Structure formats: C-alpha cells, structure tokens
Image: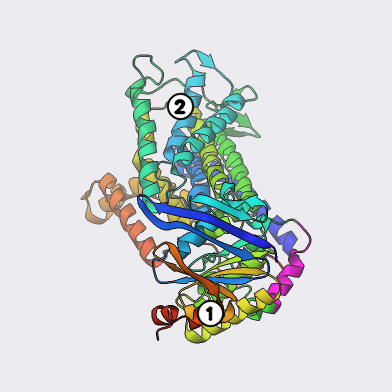
Amino acid sequence: MAVLLDVLNLEVRYGGIAAVKGISFAVEEGEMVCLIGANGAGKTTTLKALARMLPSAGELRYRNERLDRMASHALISRGLALVPEGRGVFARLTVAENLAMGAYHRNDGGVVADLERVHELLPRLRERRNQLAGTLSGGEQQMLAIGRALMGRPQLLLLDEPSMGLAPLMVQKVFEVIRAVAAQGVTILLVEQNARLALEVCSRGYVMESGCITLADSAAVLTADPRVRAAYLGE
Amino acid sequence: MTAKHRSWLGMALIGTALALAPIVVGASLGNAWVRVLDFAALYIMLALGLNIVVGFAGLLDLGYIAFYAVGAYLYALLASPHFGIHWPVWAVLPLGALVAGIFGVLLGAPTLRLRGDYLAIVTLGFGEIIRIFLNNLNTPVNITNGPKGIARIDAISLFGQPLSKSVDFLGITFSGVMLYYYLFVVLALGIVFVGIRLQDSRIGRAWVAIREDEVAAKACGINTRNVKLLAFAMGATFGGVSGGLFAGFQEFVSPESFGLMESIMVLCMVVLGGMGHIPGVILGGLMLTVLPEAFRHGAGPMQQAVFGKVLLDPEALRMLLFGLALIAVMLYRPAGLWPEPRHRRELAK
C-alpha cells in the first residue's frame, strides 16, 4: 500500500506553548487510522495543522506534494477534506445548499451523481433537504457535515471528534456511516476521544499525550494494551 | 396570468410609483420632502453597500461611513474651485468607486483574522482615522480645507444640464431636487441589481459560507482571504459612489458629515430592515431617513394641537422616539422588519 499522508516532526505552537511537539505518523491509502487521547493532548490541533488552518513546523506530505506549503482552501481540490470539530454546518443555509457548498470547488459533471450517492448513504439528508441546517439535531448535523465533505469527492477524510456531544445511539449511527464511507474506498484519519469506538472501527491507532505520540500500533494491540485500557477504556 | 407576467406587472407598477413619487410628494408636501427622498435614495445605496459586508459576509463594520467620506471628498477635490479642477461627474464617480474600493482593501487586509467585536473596534478606529485626517489635512499643505470643509462644489451635471437647475418638461416643472431624485433612484436600482446578482452568484454563496462558519468555508475550498477582501472592496465601492453623489448634491462637504453616528445609522438601517435581505435593507434605509424627518416636522404641531403648547423640544423627542422604535423592533422582530424568508428554494436538485 502506498503512503497517502506522511507527517514528519509536526510541531504546532500557540504563542510560546507547544501544543504538538514534533510528532511523526503516516496514513496509507485505503486505511482507517485513529488518533486517540485525552482532552488537550493535541489531537484537534494536529488535525487543524493538517488542514492548514494553523501554522506549523515540520514536513507534511500528501501523495508527493508538500501540504505545509499549501493554503487550506487548496486542499479539497486535491482530495483532502476536513469535517471540522463541532460539525461547522452552515446553519442558515438549507441542507441542500450545505451539500452544494461541499462541491463548491468542482465544475465537473459528476456533482449530481455524487449528491445521489450521499443521499443514498444518508437518506435522512434527502428527507430534510429543504430544512435549514441549524434546525437539524446534533447527529443529523454531523451526518450533514460528513455528507458535505463527501461532496468534494475526497480521497482522504479528516474527521474531528464526530461523536462529540451526541447521544450514544446517534454515535453508533455516525460510526456506521463512517464505516460505510471507508468501505467506498475513502481513506480516513479519525480523531476521537471515544477511544473504544475509534479502535473498534479503525485498523491502526496512535495515542497522543500532551503533544506527543506515546503509542502506535494496530487497533487490536492497542485495545489489549493495559496502559490504554487503564487510561482510555476505563478499566 | 403567469408568474412572469405578474413580475413584469409588479416591476412596471414599482417603476411608475418611483417615477411619480417626487411629482406627487413635491406637489403635496413641498420640495423639502423631495429632498428627504433624495437622501433616502443615498442612504439606501449606502445601506446596500454595508449589507454586503455585514449582511452577506457577516463582517461587522462600524467605520463604513469612511468610504462615503472618501467618495465625497474625492468628488469635492476633483470638481470644485478648491484646486481649480472641474472634472465631469462620469469621470469622478467611477474614480471615487475605485479609490473607495482600494480603501476597502486597505481596511480589510489587516483585519482578516478578526471577527465580531474585535473587528468592530478596528473598523470603528479606521472610520475615525479617516475623519480625523479630513479634519487635519489643511496643514502643512491644504488638501481638505480642514474643519471648514470644501464649499462651492460643482453640481452634478448630465448632458450639459446641471441637476441643480429646474427643467420644464411636458408642462411640469422639475426642480433640482427632483432631477437628483431620478438620478439617485436609477443608480440605486443599479446597485440593487448588482446586489441581487452578487447574492445569487458563487461569490455570494462564499460570503454566506464565511458568515456561517469560516473553518468549514475554508474546508469547502473557499479562499476566505480573497473573498473577505472582495466583500470589503465591493461594499466600499458602493459607499464611494454614494459619497460622490452626496458631494455633488450638497455642493459642500465637511468632516462632520462623516462621524461615527452616521456609520451607526447606516448599520441600523441594515439591521432594522433585515440583515442580508435586500428588500429589507431598502425598507430600513427608507424608514430611517423618512421617519426622523416626519418626527421633526410632526412633533411640534402635534403637541401644539393636543396640549396647546410645545412641551418637549421636537429635536429631543425625535431621538427619543427613534431610540424607542429601535428597541421595540429588536425586541419583537429581532431578525429585522423584513427578514429573509426562512424557507428557500432548493438550490440543487
């Protein structure tokens, strides 16, 4: 498998404080990888740096391009989509308009077909297409955010805490959708506090602790690791 | 009757009403009220410009009047005896729009990372800087003539006809204020048209996306920096055009016309009417120009009739009623008097 995303010594600072302290990791094509860790470990910061929303030091390679030299708005046309933390739907636009915004950069003829695919994957969005996004429930908004990212036809999907603030049943549904997206061949990098769920769906994982990656292994090994069990799985 | 016929009929009715308004108002209420309509048209243009920045792109701008000032002073400098330059209006207005647009980018560039209250403070400062410059640029070289302002500005003149002089046409005498009215209304309609086209364009969508969520807008592939600068520039352009018209209409400009209160007033028009909704903004501009004048003229005689004497100074009462009206609207119609309809058409099928 070819390496899709290669991160080398990524460092992000907020003023004088280093939030991410020189981490390195890689995501291969077709993989589903998670980044787990406690609050404030630097997971979201890492993802924001990958999406070029924050200035960072270190090398970020995506395919054969240097991500760290690109502007955030240039990423989606290269197949790299972010589902931001807290969903970030356009509240005063309708569901249909939100999905259309996901295809903003595209001018190929495939948008209609992709909308059909997203509607098949997330039938609830079809039902609610004329409703304002701000009136959807939290789970539906998360679905919409994922659907909007898919409208950009990504090869790599960066998901930031998709389970945040959702009822357990809704979390299950969101993760089912994420699985289905992965099954369509989209590579996924998932940032999650809910380590149990993340390790269930992903094949590999990285554990972050105060800005560093402390563990890196397959999901099965991590799930069995006593340190992970104690710290993140509540055993 | 089909929908298309209906909309044509509607436009014809609006057009007729707009064309007859100054004649009717002038005959019944006098030319002072036609002048109020002129100002309403100017303020509507300003409000539509600010609506792009505040309503569409969600960037709170408290210094918007600075662009009006730039347009007005540019006209004043290029068409008055101050420097002895007398350029025609068709040259000065586009130049004013351009220069104001450049000022818009100048304001936008350092504020790209700011939002909400922080942005409001910086834009407020920008507005004040422009006003203070205008006030003080009379030494060492006299550019703006300082607080005295620039007088004897050339009246706007079209096809050799100065709009300040009345014209007889079809047996009706069109006074200067009426001629200005027609010019302002035509230009305001042009600005409405541009605004509507912008709103439905890709750029308009990008503005709305930035207003709703900037991170998500970036993730959708929107170059937020350029799109925000464009919002500032477009808004400023509209302000520059109306400023130039204001200078030619008043034939006098001075820094005190461009204070913070004016910025707030234009912002009130946008918010009161319905942020981001062009018909609402037009209504807001019209109401906030006409109603204070009505209070001014009506409050004195009304007290005289009811109490037999004037108890409250009409000027003070005007601001009081105005403030109360604003509070009432914000309490009972927080989205504005005529907000955007909540249910929109489906964008993509």
Secondary element at image label 2:
helix
* Residue pictured at 47% horizontal, 78% vertical: A194
Residue A211's label in the rendered image is none
Image quadrant holding the N terminus of chain B, namely bottom right
Which region is colored magenta? A108-120
Examine the image and state in which quarter residue B271 appears: bottom left
Circle 1 residue: A221
* Residue pictured at 47% horizontal, 83% vertical: A167
Circle 2 residue: B73
C-beta proximity under 8 Å, tags 1 and 2 = no
Please tell me which residue lies in front, B289 or B33.
B289
| Position of residue B337 measured from the top left corner of the image (x, y, whole percent) | 46, 61
In the rendered image, residue A76 lying in the magenta stretch gets the answer no
| Position of residue B329 measured from the top left corner of the image (x, y, whole percent) | 39, 61
Please tell me which residue lies in front, A218 or A44.
A218
How many other residues sit within 10 Å of disc 1, few (<14), some (14-19) or many (≥20)? Answer: some
* Residue pictured at 50% horizontal, 48% vertical: B53
Examine the image and state in which quarter residue B307 appears: bottom left
Image quadrant holding the C terminus of chain B, namely bottom right
**Which of the two marks, 1 or 2, is nearer to us in this view?**
1
